[in-house]
Image (spheres, rainbow, N blue to C red):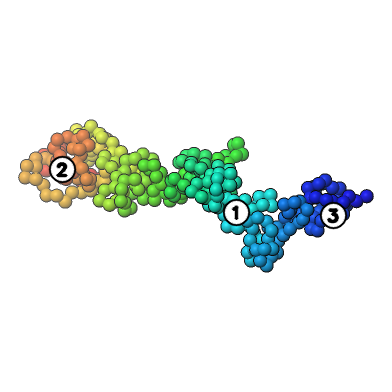
Amino acid sequence: MFSAVTELGESCQPGDEPNIEYSECRNGIWNCELDRAVSKNNQKCEKGIGSVCETDMDCTTKNAECANNVCTCRKYYYLSNDQCLPGIASSCDNDTDCKPENSECRVGHCYCLIGYVAESINSCLPVAAYGDSCEKDIQCSAELPNAVCLHVDNSISNTTNSTCACAEGYHYNYLRCHKRRVLGMSCMNLAECYLDSGDRVVCKNGRCACDSGYIQVNNTVCKEIQRYNINACPNENPSHGRPRRDVEELSRLIVVQPSRTRRPKEQPAHITRYHRSVFTSLNHLGGPSNQYLDGTTWCKHPQSSKVHRHNHGH
């Protein structure tokens, strides 16, 4: 026996005949068809969101309009349970008019609460700082430009960890995400210059460079120059005039070239000459006193009766 429906929302059984146009028995309850909306008195199925329309009058849902011949929610309103609810930026009189969670009515419009950011017109998410957990990019970039929500899969726990980080091509320095500029690239300030590790970098003469006492290994690595307590002259073993082992180790960091500088007048009779193409002398690195600021060292050559000129590596 078929029941006679008097109001939408009442219980029903499969096979019951509806007596309200555009209604149907769905999940044991009388409902309007999916493209229709329930009237205020629950006795009619009116053209709702998604229904075909010609004018705004055809769309009976509150705060709906006819756009491109389809009923849709007005701008700044969103669909929820067949209703068009006021979202972020919609007009309001009080906080209860603003339906998104963590929103409020401020100066006649709906806004997210302080400390929250609008991810959409119906969603306010908490603002996240660098390294904080996040869901969407907007949480990170709200107060940190050029930041994104980075998703990293954890294969061990089979989970995804999402935290705020600088976007690709940017690095975090001095509380901001700066465009990454490696050694040798132009820069406006120190914060722009990037190293893989450490902070021994400077912006000098408009270029990123290693700090004093460091040398460039590649475009993202500065290595400290080891300070050796050495005598840069050959040892007492006269075989081939080879320098001491600590000088050989130092030469790994310093380019050694034959010198073109003329011999000083005070040059001793028996000498070996080493020239190192460096910005600072070996004196700066803790070497002996018989060195010149251009990186040249004059040394007596042991067990030699003739003037001997030695170029390192030859």
Indicate the secondary structure of the residue bearing disc 2. loop
Could you tell me the amino acid type at mark 3? Pro
Question: Residue under circle 1?
Answer: 77
Left or right, residue 173 beside residue 124: left
**Label whose residue precedes the other's in the sequence (2 or 3):** 3
Q: Nearer the viewer, residue 227 or 50?
A: 50
**Residues at circles 2 and 3 in contact by the CB criterion of under 8 Å:** no
Q: Quadrant of residue 63?
A: bottom right
* Above/below status of 68 relative to 163: below
Drawn side of residue 284 relative to residue 8, left or right: left
Give the residue drawn at x 60%, y 58%. Answer: 74
Q: Are marks 1 and 2 in contact (CB under 8 Å)?
A: no
Residue assigned mark 3:
18
In the foreground, 216 or 11: 11
Q: Nearer the viewer, mark 2 or mark 3?
A: 3
Disc 2 to disc 3, C-alpha distance: 102 Å
Q: Amino acid at mark 2?
A: Leu
Nearest the viewer among 17 and 39 is 39
Which residue shows up at 32% across the image and 40% down it? Answer: 200
Q: CA distance from mark 1 to mark 2?
A: 75 Å
Q: Secondary structure at mark 3?
A: loop
Q: Which residue is mark 2?
A: 293
Q: Residue at x 15, y 39 (%)?
A: 291
Q: Position of residue 182 (x, y in %)?
A: 36, 49
Residue 57 location, x and y as percent? Answer: 67, 63
